[in-house]
Amino acid sequence: MTRKNLYIFSLVLSVAGYALIAWDVIDSRHGPTVCLFKTVIDLPCPSCGTTRSIAALAAGDVYQAMAINPFGVMSAFALIVIPLWIAADVLRKKDTFYHSYLAVERHVARKPWLSFLAVLIVVANWLWNVSKAL
Amino acid sequence: MEQQKVDMFLMTSGKFFEGYQLGAIKEKLTKLDDAKLLQLQSVNLKDPIIMLIVSLLGGHFGIDRFVLGEVGLGVAKLLTCGGFGIWTIVDWFLIMGRTREMNMQNIQQAMY
């Protein structure tokens, strides 16, 4: 992936994320269900509850945010850091975000146990989501 | 490399690449040393059809992107519930082409 594509794609995903959170906060019915898996199978996916978690975090309730879905806290962090990082890169005409992204990808590819650990965390979170019936 | 070996390689591995890439691969292989063949055969090439099945079944969780080695996109896809459902569907149509592209990149690395 080229630098330009990565930056545009990350920004589009971030804007979509912010739009969804805004919808969830403004609309009392908690916005639309964007999860294809949940719509089709009627079971939550590992990331279901992320929007609700971020909304709770925005309201200052960190415990509730973690209880709904810990991935929400991760996503909130990414939603704050990534657009700022890209903006800083574009303004300073540098590509630190792009190089960091490539470095992390290479690092993970060299260490299969990291992928295994990530899969374990995702599956555990998924089981938790199912038990919470998000 | 002998023509027969080149043809054999293209016959067995042709499905992993785009049709228009085969000419360039053939040209490159004929100029290569015989010793490189073993190295080329050990390159981990992904089958586009298998990747399509992975994308259909696990695309929502970003598994298709993880398998291709695009960890960043895989994490993004996972955390956004398959790119809010849209990216999952888009990838059903893109993943075969992307797999062939990645295969080409991998084999190019092995050839040089």
Image (spheres, rainbow, N blue to C red):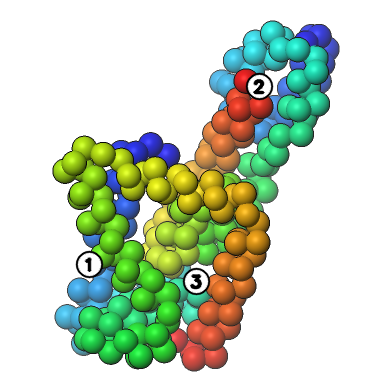
Amino acid type at circle 1 is Ala
Which residue corresponds to the image point at 24% horizontal and 45% vertical from the top-left? Answer: A89
Among the two numbered marks 3 and 1 on one chain, the one whose residue lies closer to the N terminus = 1
Residue highlighted by disc 1: A19
Residue highlighted by disc 2: B111
Left-right relation of B60 to B32 = left
Between marks 3 and 1, how big is the CA–CA gap?
21 Å
Left-right relation of B59 to B14 = left
**Which residue is at the front of the view, B96 or A16?**
A16
* Residue A29 placement (x, y as % from top left): 25, 86
Left-right relation of A134 to A5 = right
The label nearer to you, 2 versus 3, is 2
**Which residue is at the front of the view, B56 or A57?**
A57
Q: Secondary structure at mark 1?
A: helix
Quarter of the image that includes the N terminus of chain B:
top right
Which residue corresponds to the image point at 41% horizontal and 89% vertical from the top-left? Answer: A67
Amino acid type at circle 2 is Met
Q: Mark 2 near mark 3, Cβ–Cβ under 8 Å? A: no
Q: Secondary structure at mark 3?
A: helix
Q: Secondary structure at mark 2?
A: helix
Between marks 2 and 3, how big is the CA–CA gap?
41 Å
